[in-house]
Image: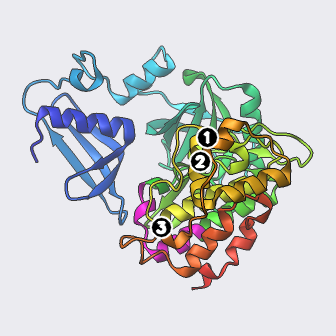
Amino acid sequence: MYINKVTQSYVLWLIREMSVFSATGGFSVKISEVLKESQQAVELKAVEIANGNSFTIKLVLDSKPMDFSSVYGHSSAKQKSFLEQLEEKYKVKDGLTHTKFHIQLPLETENMEPSIQNRHFVIENEVGQGSFGSVFKLKDIVNSHTFAVKCLKDVDPEMIKKEIHILEKMRNSRNVIHFYGAVYIEPLRATCLVMEHINCISLDDILDSLTLEDIRYYSHQLLIAIDECHKRGIIHRDIKPDNILVDPLKRELRLIDFGVADLYDANKPQETDIGTLNFYAPELLMDYKMFDHAIDMWAFGCIFASAVFRRRRLFEGDTFTEVLQDITSVLGSDKLFEYIANYGILMNSIKMTECANYPVQTWDSLITEENSDVATAEALDLVDKLIVFDHKCRLSAEEAMKHPFFNE
């Protein structure tokens, strides 16, 4: 396969930044690993999103060095390797290419699973990024066991302490990423959380193309994970497709990223500016600080409805008001104002004006030729019981698992 310099530069930029490459014809793969990289070619390990098959992509350039200046907006005489970029990012003095990390964990797993104390690891590659830092894949140099390590760079120590505490409470929960312990890795100068590593893709990669059976199966698996959180008194607060990992071959699901999770206290007002805007429950959008576990069920409802209606996002908007307006355009202005009155929620006049005069839209009005095979009557009924203004009327995770949709 020959790809000219401009196209190749763009593809490589896309791979580095998004880890997703869509070729012509709708064939979609997720790039899981850079196998080889030089100035003339790059060899990539890819996973087909639809069925989980893995294969290798090799992109070959002509004899001239690659120029990324048109893509990155600056001259780049020599592209740095992954480890070189990592060394620069974390200001590592002595290099990482041959660094062996000696990780000694003070905590053992509660059910006596194999401990990773006194083991030596090398960094294989980066598998995720966020505002917190990076997630790396580590490999044991003796037995090749792999782990994921989330490196928290420049994060408030109290936030790190809380995340560790919550992950410890969630240990051995079904469908929740398994946590082994926390360590400080000196070369990276970062506190790192050591967790299980699974070969997976993000639910976001496949959400709008799942079959009805897949929607039923993975939604139930996600509800199990949410129920495990809620039974331990934990609100995840950032449930979204990017925080849900799926292994299509093993049909496994893991809920990840407890960075903004918190313990529920019915008597404590909580910060509402948390999570991801498009999955905010109405109470968060209106700064109602006495929210509870129901915000997680709203987010689940948004994910479920997105799969059922084959939409990337159920509700859109760049501001709190825009998202609330989009929600109200479906649920209706009367229901919004009834909710505000029942809970004594204060709402400014501008926001009320923006959300006025919307009639109720029925869920079956969102059925199209593209989603009619999955938008069943039972699926719409479950959406209707989750996407409601009044948080006390939303189904709990335990109740949702008993819904007839899962018995079809």
Question: How far apart are the alpha carbons under marks 1 and 2?
Answer: 6 Å
Instruction: Tell me which amino acid carries mark 3.
Output: Leu
Q: Quadrant of residue 358?
A: bottom right
What's the CA distance linking mark 3 and mark 2?
A: 17 Å
Determine whether label 1 and label 2 are within 8 Å by CB.
Answer: yes
Three-letter residue code for mark 1: Thr
Q: In the figure, is residue 355 to the left or right of 264? A: left
> Which is more N-terminal, label 1 or label 3?
1
**Residue drawn where x is 74% and y is 61% of the image:** 228
**Residue 366 badge:** 3
- Mark 1 closeness class: few <14, some 14–19, many ≥20 residues within 10 Å: some
Give amino acid for label 2: Gln
Q: Which residues are magenta?
A: 205-219
- Crowding at mark 2 (Cα within 10 Å: few <14, some 14-19, many 20+): many
Residue at left offset 61%, top offset 84%? 407
Q: Secondary structure at mark 1?
A: helix
Residue lying furthest bottom: 408
Res. 322 image quadrant: top right
Label 1: which residue? 321
Residue 186's disc number? none
**Magenta span includes 216:** yes
Q: Is residue 293 visible?
A: no
Q: Circle 2 — which element?
A: helix
Query: In terms of depth relative to the viewer, which is nearer, 313 or 28?
Result: 313
User: Which numbered marker is on residue 325?
Assistant: 2
Asked whether the beta carbons under mark 3 and mark 1 sit within 8 Å of each other, the answer is no
Of helix, strand and loop, which one carries label 3? helix
Question: Can the viewer see residue 62 in this picture?
Answer: yes
Relative to 9, say whether 297 is above or below.
below
The quarter of the image holding the C terminus is bottom right
Marks 3 and 2, the one that precedes in the sequence: 2
